[in-house]
Image (cartoon, rainbow, N blue to C red):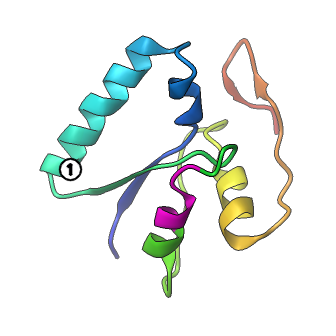
Amino acid sequence: MEPTIIINKVDLLDDGGYPDQAALVKELVEIYRSLGRKVVLVSADSGTGMDQLREVMRDRTSVFSGQSGTGKSSLINAVAHHDLPVGEVVSGTRKGAH
């Protein structure tokens, strides 16, 4: 098993609305990579990094794990051409609604 860290919703960092998070993500990526972990930055919404994610998953069994609202279902839908239900993130908790 080869753990890979997937950071989704990077499109939200690009819109300039989260400058502190952009710096934090950059720092985390550097830390994880220095520890020898593969890190893939993606956006299920914009398609950023999806080809790289598909390549990481090619000919393997994959498991997605993470907090509610991080876009796991959206990523699976985009990569595997499924139609899993996805919901809006609840603004108060910033977590998934389903």
- Residue at horizontal 56 percent and vertical 13 percent from the top: 17
Q: Is residue 5 above or below residue 83?
A: above
Query: Residue 77 at x, y = what percent?
Result: 74, 61
Q: Which residues are magenta?
A: 48-53
Q: How many marks?
A: 1
**71 vs 81, nearest the viewer:** 81
Query: From the viewer's perspective, is residue 69 above or below residue 80?
Result: above
Q: Nearer the viewer, residue 46 or 92?
A: 46
Q: Is residue 40 above or below residue 26?
A: below
For mark 1, what is the residue? 33
Along the line of sight, which residue is nearer the eye, 19 or 74? 19
The rendered magenta stretch, by its main secondary structure, is classed as helix
Taking 59 as reference, is 26 above or below it?
above
Q: Quadrant of the C terminus?
A: top right
| Pointer 1 local density, CA inside 10 Å: few below 14, some 14–19, many at least 20 | few
**Residue flagged by tag 1: what amino acid is it?**
Arg
78 horizontally vs 33: left or right = right
SS at circle 1: helix
Q: Residue at x 34, y 76 (%)?
A: 1
Q: Residue 93 is drawn in which quadrant?
A: top right
Indicate the quadrant where residue 88 lies: top right
Q: Is residue 88 magenta?
A: no
Which of the 4 image quarters holds residue 54?
A: bottom right
Residue 8 percent location from the top left of the image:
54, 43
Question: How far from the left and from the top, in percent, is residue 50?
Answer: 56, 59
- Residue at 70 percent across and 44 percent down: it is 45
